[in-house]
Each structure stands twice: as C-alpha cells, then as structure tokens.
C-alpha cells in the first residue's frame, strides 16, 4: 500500500538512513494492542514487521473502534498497525504451521498475546520454536502472564487496570472507580515494557547467540508503575484510596474549573511554587505560617485550600488563568480535549500529529513517533495494511514458495 | 540464576543526574538488567525524590528506596567549577546520561549536549522535560499532573460532566516517559555500537501520555469526534465498566465481544440474555446500555465479590476484582509471579516490600541488588574507581563542598 506523507513530520530521515532496528525482522502474530504495539515501536525505528493474520478473520482490531471507508480497517487499526506488512496464514492447518515455522526460522523476534497454552496446543511451544531458531527472542503478553494460578483467565486492559491496583485509585472517594483515562492504557504500558525486554534480549543475543522468552502480564506492567503503593502498605499498612482530582503528595495539586466552564491542572508540589501561586492570586497572606504556609498544613486543610483555588480560577476564563499562572511561573496546564490539542501550537511545533494519505481511507491524522531521537528519528512508512497485502511477497520472496502452491494454499484457505 | 556480568547490560555505565521519577526510571530499568547506574546528586538534599512520598526512619521516602534501586549515589555540586570538571570526567567514561532539568539548564552550566558530545562522541543522552527541548512551551515547568492535562488523558478521566479526576496515579506520565526514554536509549545504544556515534533522545512528558490514546486523534481529525468522560464505561462495548458487589467491593467487567457477553450471561445463570432477541448483539446492548447495566448491577449487588468472581471464572467471563493494595498483598497470582519482593534494608532496620522487575526474561532475568542508596554513599568509591581520586583529594573536595 502506498501512503504518502502530505505534511512534513518533524522526524523525517532520508529514505536510505540506517535506523537502529534496520535488518531486524519481527513477526507479530498477536491481536489488538497488548504486544503488537511493541512491534509498532520497533517498526518505527526500522524493523521489518510481518503481521501474521488469519486468512478470513484477520486481526479483530481491524473492526475495533471507528469505521472508515476501508471495510477492513477502523481508525484504531490504521493508526496502530502502522509500518506493517500483512501476511495471512491459518495456524489451525498443518501447512500453515509449517510455513509459520519457516518464517520464524528467518526472523529475529516473535510477538504473541494468545491465552497461555494456545500456541502450545498448535504445536508451537517455545521448545519447538527455539529448535528452528535458537536466537529467537519471543515476547509473550497476556492478562496474567505465562505462569501462576490465573494464567488462563481472559484478561484485557480494563481487567488488568483493576487487578493491578490502578482503577481502585481513579475516581472520587466513596464513589465508583472510573477508567484511568484511556481504556487501553495497560495494553500500551505492557507493550513498552515488552519492547524494552526485546531490546535487552537482542543485546544478549548479540553477545551469546542465544534467544529467550519475555513474559509480561498486563496487570504487572500496570502494578509496576504505582510508585510507593506496595512499600507503604508493606511497612505502614497504608491502603491508598481514591483521591478525586487531587493527590496525597501535595495541595493544591489537582483540576480546577474556570469561569468559562473549562478546566486547568495546577500542581504546587513545592513550597516555592505555592508561594508564587499565592502571589499570582494576590493572596500572599495565604502563604504565612499561621495559614497555609506549610505543605503539612495544606494537606490537612485540603478542602479549604482547594475551595480558595476553585473560587479564584472560577473568576477568570481558562486563557486568563493560564496567562496569570505562566507569568507567575506556577505549574499549570490546560486540561485539553482532543479539540484543544488540535488547536495547540506546541503539539503542532513538536510534530505530535502526523497526517498521512491512505489509498482507501483518505487523509488520516495519527500520533507521531515517541520518543524523538536526534540522529535516527523514527518514521511512519504506512498505515495499517489491507489484509494479506504482503502474503505473496513474503511467501515467494522470503520462503521460496512457488506461485502454484500459493494458488493451492489460497483455495484451501491456508493463506 | 545468571552471574552479574552475564546480564545483558553488564558493562554499560549510566549517569543519572535527573530527579524524581521520569528520566531516573529509565536508569532504574537499565540498572535492573545489569547496567552500572551512578546517581549524581546535589550534596545538600540530593534528588527531590528522596522527599517524595512517605518518609522512613532515615528520612528518605519509600518511593526513593524502591525506585532508586541498584543505583550508586555520588554527590557533586554542578554549580561549582570543580563539580563541573569532575562531572565531565565522569561523562567521558559513561555510555548513557539521563537528565530531566528544564531545557537550557545544563547548557547554562556549560554541560549541554554539544559540550558533552565533544568530550564523549559515543554518548547517548536522554532528555526528558515537561514539553520537550523545543517548541513554544519548552520553558514552562512540567510535572506528570500537568502532562496528564495537556495530553488529553485527564480530560477523559471521571464521570460524564463531572470533575475530571487523576488517572489513577499522579506519577503515571513520569513512569511512561521513563519507559519510552528507555526504549530510546536502547535503540540509540544499538545505533552507537554499529556506527560509533551517540545521539540524544528528546521527550516531553505529555508526549508519552498522548501517544497512548489509540484513535482519539484520528477520530477527531476525520469526524470531529470530541471524546468525553465516560466514567468507567466505553462507547463501543456494553456491559463494560465497574460494578459494586453485595459486600461493598467492586469488580470490573469487560464484554468487548458477544461471545464474552454470552459467558457472562451463563455466569449470571441467565443464558437467555445472550439470545439474539434479547441482548445477544453488541449493538443491541449499546442501544439499551442503561437497561443492560442495570441488570448487571442488580446481579453484582446480590452476591459477595468472592462468590461472584468464582461464578465468572468458572464460566470464563471477563471479570476481575478492583484490587486495592491490601487485596493485592493477599492475592495468589501476585505471589505465584513473585511480583512483590521483600528486601531487608539495614539502614532503617526494616524489610521493605517493593514491586519486582518487569518484564520477566527467561535467560537473563533482571534483579534488585539493593534499595535506594543513602545520599553520597558511593562518592568516594566511584570517584576513586573511575577518576582515581585518593582519600586526600576526596577530603579536599568535601571541604570545598564540591561533593
């Protein structure tokens, strides 16, 4: 599929630039995001990613989210299946398995996220895979990981946020816990951990020639990033509860409503910042030691302090609050909707939104590559591919399958 | 278990001159897989992360003990000419430098990218800041809280039309940036090994959170859809959300497909709900969202959580507990996976429980050698080992308050 960039992204290396992952071949046989997003990251930095999909159904992510003019691609698919080649293979059929193993033999990385035991039931256990390719690095992402009593339970990001302790903390005290911002957060976080595992394992392979398995439960990726939550319970029995828009660390530190009904985030983590904020509010007396001049006092009088801040923000529009706080060097940010983001000059400047032309779907704007590397910036070569767009190329070019056999495989729905 | 120098990042030396969690977390991850991480801190007070969260007997907080794991602490005053000189000598001998000062700060001190690259052309430098190294907002102070707001993730968190809430944890964007930063560093190290040339990685805190918003941006660009807060629910599936059980606890349910809903209906003992004339199809359930949620809510409210979960697991329904940290400490899966590690910390005379290394590698698993060091604990050791300074020289530097 030919996609052309209609707008110059910030990071566009010359076409022949050697990227860090150039020459690395990745098979992504996963579905949705948890795991496959690791392949997207590697592909942005030069890896060749072969998305292996069922010949009829394809990755269900193709149908998840908002539809486009392409019958086989939602917007989520177009954006997150970026930089891939789609190869169809039915892993329930013997010939499908044979061809899959041949692909594995010629690849560096394999990414999967089936329920633990599934690949084994197809005869694709780690022992078998390692035999055809001793240097293989395999990322396995699942809800609960490859081991433990819950390993075969179905686990999605939503369940993993809950099981991993994050959802319990999102929402107002005593009220319903809410989604921690975006429902696939755990899918992304587990994939980034997975990408780190792959890069570390590839380094080990370079030294020793030996591959290995990276085993990530989505819940443990979520649980790993909760700062002192386990340590504080372990040592002091402290059970952190939902904190609404605030934080146990500091006050005022939260979301405040402005006169025009829009919101800002303000974060006075240190004494100096609170002092500046009282000057911005023209209420320097609030910073006196008899009032709220110490973090401990503000934490104890959280509701009172927040009420004062809300009253102040409520007397200005969001733009006014932003200007006053920025001029006074108070940490502040607009609580952006996606509309705000599209209008924001900083997003524009940093190239965080990239517009690409897709043959079938037309112009599509997607998030740009993160992180930004100075010498070898990543790039988006194409949006989510049509089902099986590279089956011929890969089977003929890489595996040497004859055109006659491919026709036969098509008839038998193996590819 | 593997030997120390068999770890994948053995032989990589990292200087972490950053503060709190964002860029330091990248160094933490590298340290878990064998890199030698030298934490460079101001001689007075050190990294502000030492004061972030719940203090222990030795003042350093639990966050510090957990997240500064495996690091060696060296004090150096970078405002001091002699401090700068020593810092440059350290950088000359390291592979990676992690920093998250406000853009321009290191340049002001004469130790920006240009200067350091001259000293060490193989250097890989991670630079994390609120808004990145360029752009109109680059000079604004940025914390994870602000990054959540700017990235659009806080806007989506909370009940419809209610106050937007913290997306679970106030440090989320810090961790996500540390993770992305680590990906960048490992890529840049590959490139360096091939070409001999280092580079820097430029990351804004807000960018890491924004990158994880799936089709939020494409849907606005194509259809003008502005996604709003949905509480615990999502637009494209039902039932999907959080439901209270009879004993006042909560469960999460996620029926993203019809098959999963059929399993839930089985668990409820009401398979008829999954017939095509009732709620068998996703679009019917979405159209009658309130009714469906009420049926599920009534059922959840009739059972204690443990009983409800048992029925759901038996039917393979997509349900899980909304765990608080006490639930987690009692959970078999966390123990079977060894997600919690108890480490004896002699400096406070206590056992501290911290999250184990993620991800788990089969041949070269990461490890926690020790918890966060005391301020300057390794100053003499590191300056002796790397720069050949003897006790007299170090005593001298102490007198001058350089270290």
Image (cartoon, coloured by chain):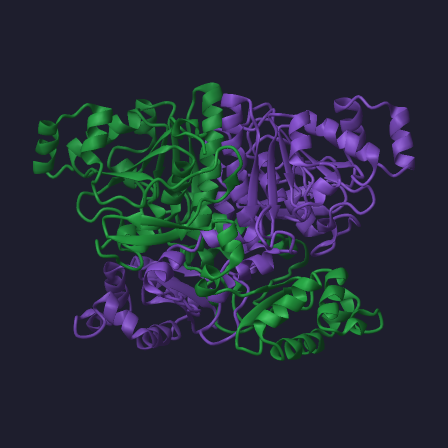
Report the front residue among B278 and B188. B278
In terms of image quadrants, where is residue A109?
Answer: top right
| A38 to the left or right of A360 | left
Q: Position of residue A117 (x, y in %)?
A: 68, 45
Relative to A330, residue B113 above or below: above
Taking the spot 43% from the left edge, 27% from the top edge, the residue there is B6
Q: Could you tell me if residue A183 is visible in this image?
A: no
In terms of image quadrants, where is residue B4?
Answer: top left
Relative to B289, residue A7 above or below: above
The hue used for chain B is green
Q: Could you tell me if residue A39 is visible in this image?
A: yes
Q: Position of residue A354 (x, y in %)?
A: 59, 44
Task: For the C terminus of chain A, give its image quadrant.
Answer: top right
| A354 to the left or right of B79 | right
Relative to B358, residue B317 above or below: below
Q: Position of residue A359 (x, y in %)?
A: 75, 41
Q: Position of residue A250 (x, y in %)?
A: 32, 64
Task: For the N terminus of chain A, give its image quadrant.
Answer: top right
| B15 to the left or right of A78 | left
- Outermost residue on the top side: it is B195
Report the front residue among B5 and B193. B5
Taking the spot 32% from the left edge, 73% from the top edge, the residue there is A302
Report the front residue among B308 and A180. B308
The chain assigned the colour purple in the figure is A
**In the rendered picture of this protein, how many numbered marks are placed on residues?**
0
Taking the spot 33% from the left edge, 29% from the top edge, the residue there is B114
| B129 to the left or right of B263 | left
């Amino acid at each position: 599929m030919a996609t052309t960039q209609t707008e110059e992204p910030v990071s566009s290396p010359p076409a022949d630039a050697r990227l860090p992952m150039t020459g690395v071949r990745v098979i992504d046989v996963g579905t949705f995001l948890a795991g496959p997003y690791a392949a997207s990251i590697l592909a942005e930095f030069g890896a060749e990613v072969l998305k292996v999909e069922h010949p009829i159904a394809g990755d269900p992510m193709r149908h998840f989210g908002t539809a486009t003019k392409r019958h086989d691609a939602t917007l989520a698919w177009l954006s997150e299946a970026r930089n891939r080649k789609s190869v169809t293979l039915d892993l329930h059929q013997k010939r499908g398995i044979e061809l899959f193993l041949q692909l594995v033999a010629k690849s560096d990385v394999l990414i999967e996220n089936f329920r633990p035991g599934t690949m084994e039931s197809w005869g694709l256990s780690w022992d078998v895979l390692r035999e055809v390719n001793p240097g293989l690095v395999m990322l396995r992402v699942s809800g609960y990981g490859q081991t433990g009593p819950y390993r075969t339970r179905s686990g999605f990001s939503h369940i993993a946020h809950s099981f991993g302790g994050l959802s319990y903390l999102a929402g107002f005290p005593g009220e319903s816990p809410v989604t921690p911002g975006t429902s696939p957060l755990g899918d992304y976080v587990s994939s980034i951990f997975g990408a780190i595992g792959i890069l570390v394992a590839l380094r080990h392979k370079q030294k020793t020639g030996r591959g290995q398995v990276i085993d990530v439960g989505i819940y443990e990726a979520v649980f790993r990033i909760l700062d002192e939550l386990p340590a504080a319970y372990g040592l002091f029995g402290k059970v952190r509860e939902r904190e609404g828009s605030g934080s146990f660390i500091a006050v005022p530190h939260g979301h405040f409503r402005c006169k025009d009904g829009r919101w800002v985030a303000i974060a006075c983590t240190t004494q100096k910042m609170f002092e500046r904020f009282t000057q911005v509010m023209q209420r320097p007396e609030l910073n006196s030691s008899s009032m709220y001049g110490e973090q401990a006092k503000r934490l104890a009088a959280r509701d009172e302090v927040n009420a004062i801040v809300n009253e102040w923000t409520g007397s200005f529009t969001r733009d006014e609050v932003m200007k006053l706080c920025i001029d006074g060097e108070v940490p502040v940010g607009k609580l952006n909707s996606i509309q705000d983001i599209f209008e924001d000059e900083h997003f524009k400047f940093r190239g965080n939104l990239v517009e690409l032309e897709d043959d079938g779907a037309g112009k599509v704007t997607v998030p740009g590559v993160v992180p930004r590397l100075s010498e070898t910036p990543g790039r988006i070569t194409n949006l989510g591919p049509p089902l099986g767009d590279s089956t011929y190329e890969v089977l003929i070019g890489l595996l040497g399958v004859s055109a006659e056999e491919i026709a036969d495989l098509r008839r038998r729905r193996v590819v | 278990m593997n030997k120390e120098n068999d770890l994948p990042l053995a032989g990589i030396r990292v200087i972490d001159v950053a503060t709190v969690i964002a860029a330091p977390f990248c160094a933490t991850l590298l340290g878990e897989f064998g890199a030698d991480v030298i934490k460079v801190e101001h001689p007075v007070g050190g990294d502000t992360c030492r004061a972030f969260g719940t203090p222990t007997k030795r003042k350093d907080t639990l966050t510090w003990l957990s997240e500064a794991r495996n690091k060696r602490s060296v004090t150096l005053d970078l405002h001091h000419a002699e401090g700068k000189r020593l810092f440059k000598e350290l950088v000359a001998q390291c592979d990676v430098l992690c920093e998250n000062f406000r853009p321009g700060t290191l340049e002001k001190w004469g130790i920006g990218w240009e200067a350091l690259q001259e000293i060490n052309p193989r250097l890989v430098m991670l630079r994390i800041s609120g808004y990145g190294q360029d752009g109109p907002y680059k000079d604004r102070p940025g914390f994870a809280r602000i990054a959540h707001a700017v990235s659009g993730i806080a806007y989506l968190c909370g009940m419809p039309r209610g106050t937007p809430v913290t997306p679970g944890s106030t440090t989320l964007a810090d961790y996500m940036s540390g993770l992305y930063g680590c990906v960048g560093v490992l890529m840049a190290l590959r490139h360096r090994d091939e070409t001999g040339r280092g580079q820097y990685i430029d990351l804004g805190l807000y960018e890491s959170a924004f990158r994880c918003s799936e089709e939020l941006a494409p849907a606005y660009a194509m259809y003008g859809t502005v996604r709003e807060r949905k509480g615990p629910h999502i637009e494209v599936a039902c039932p999907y959300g959080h439901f209270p059980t009879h004993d006042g606890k909560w469960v999460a349910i996620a029926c993203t497909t019809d098959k999963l809903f059929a399993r839930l209906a089985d668990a409820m003992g009401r398979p008829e709900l999954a017939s095509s004339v009732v709620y068998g199809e996703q679009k019917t359930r979405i159209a009658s969202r309130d009714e469906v949620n009420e049926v599920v809510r009534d059922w959840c409210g009739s059972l204690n959580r443990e009983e409800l979960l048992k029925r759901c697991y038996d039917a393979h329904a997509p349900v899980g507990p909304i765990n608080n940290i006490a639930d987690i400490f009692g959970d078999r899966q966390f123990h079977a996976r060894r997600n919690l590690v108890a480490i004896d910390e002699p400096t406070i005379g206590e056992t501290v429980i911290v999250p184990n290394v993620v991800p788990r590698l089969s041949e070269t698993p990461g490890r926690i050698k020790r918890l966060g060091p005391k301020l300057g604990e390794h100053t003499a050791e590191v300056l002796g080992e790397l720069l050949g300074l003897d006790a007299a020289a170090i005593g001298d530097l102490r007198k001058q308050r350089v270290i």
